[in-house]
Amino acid sequence: MVRGTRDELLGHLADAVGSVTVAHPTRVAIDGPPAAGKTTLADELAVVLRERGRDVVRATIDDFLFPRTQRYPRGEYSAEGCYYDTHDHDALKRVLLDPLGPGGDRRFQPAVYDHTADAVLSPPVTTAPANAVLVFDGVFLLRPELLAGWDLRIFVSTALERTVDRAVIRERRVSTRADIERRWRQRYIPSQRLYFATARPTRYADVVVHNDEPQRPVWEVARREDPLSEALAADE
C-alpha cells in the first residue's frame, strides 16, 4: 500500500491510464459505494488526463438508470432491487462500452436517461478519437456482466458507515437526515454488502483507493499479469 497526497494519487492513476495499450479508447471504471468519492475522483482524473493531452469522455452510471416506474418492483428500500433493478446495463454496453471497445466504431452516446427529469434521453452520436479515455464512475461497475467492458478498473473504498455521514452532508438541502439514513441503511449499504458477497469487486480491481481521508489517500495496485483474463476465468 502507498499513502500519498491527492496529487500523487491522481498522477499514479493517470500513469496507469497511460500504460494501457489498446487499439481503441481506454475505458476506465471508477467503482465504489455511494458517497465514497467516486465522482470527485473521476472529475479530477479527467482534468489531469486532459492536461496530459488526452481526449476524455466523461460519463456516469446515473445516466444509465431505468425510468423510475421500472426501478422499484421490489420496493423503494429493497437492497436486492438496488442491485438488480436499477441500471440499464444492456444500454450501457450497446451505446457506450461496446462502441468504444475492440471492434467498435467509436460512435457512442454518453447517456440514455436524465435522472433529474426522469426522462429517457437520446443525445447526438459522437465519434471518439482512437486514443480517447472514457472515465466512467458509478456503483456496481465490476459485476460480472460488465467486467469485460473495462480496460482499467479502479475501486474507491471507504467505511460504509462513513458514507452515511457524507450523504447527510451532501443531501441535507433536499432530504431530511432521517430519510437519508433510512435509504442508506435499508437500501444502499445492504446492496453494497450483496455486491461484495456476489461479485467480489476488489478482487478484480487494478487499483483500490482507500478514501477515508481524501487528501491523504492510500492506494494499492493489483499484482497479477493479466487481471481481466483472471477475472473472466474465475466466473466461467
Image: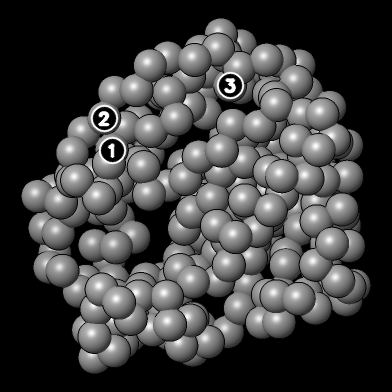
| Quadrant (top left/top right/bottom left/bottom right) for the C terminus | top right
Q: Mark 1 points at which residue?
A: 113
Task: State whether residue 147 appears in this view.
Answer: no
User: Where is residue 109 shown, x and y percent of the image?
Assistant: 43, 23
Q: Distance of mark 3 from mark 2, alpha carbons?
A: 19 Å
Residue at left offset 24%, top offset 91%: 178
Relative depth, front residue between 59 and 66:
59
Residue toward you, 119 or 232? 119
The answer to which of 148 and 48 lies nearer the viewer is 48
Q: Depth-wise, is mark 3 or mark 2 nearer the camera?
A: 2
- How far separated are the C-alphas under marks 2 and 1? 5 Å
Q: What element carries label 1?
A: strand
Could you say whether the residue bearing mark 2 is in a helix, strand or loop?
A: loop
Q: Name the residue under label 2.
A: 121
Instruction: Tell me the kind of residue under disc 3.
Output: Leu
Please rate how many residues cluster around mark 2, counting C-alpha atoms within 10 Å: few if below 14, some from 14 to 19, many from 20.
some
- Direction from residue 10 to residue 143 in the image, left or right: left
The residue lying at 29 percent from left, 63 percent from top is: 82
The residue sitting at 69% across, 53% down in the picture is 44
The quarter of the displayed image where residue 186 is located: bottom left
Asked if residue 220 is positioned above or below residue 22 in the image, the reply reads: below
Image spot of residue 45 (x, y percent): 71, 49
Q: Is residue 160 visible?
A: yes
Three-letter residue code for mark 2? Leu
Q: Which residue is the site of mark 3?
A: 100
Left or right: 41 as drawn, with respect to 200 = right
Give the mark nearer the N terminus: 3 vs 1: 3
Which residue is at 69% across, 36% downward? Answer: 151
Q: In this view, does 33 lie above or below 90?
A: below
Please report contact status of discs 2 and 1: CB closer than 8 Å, yes or no.
yes
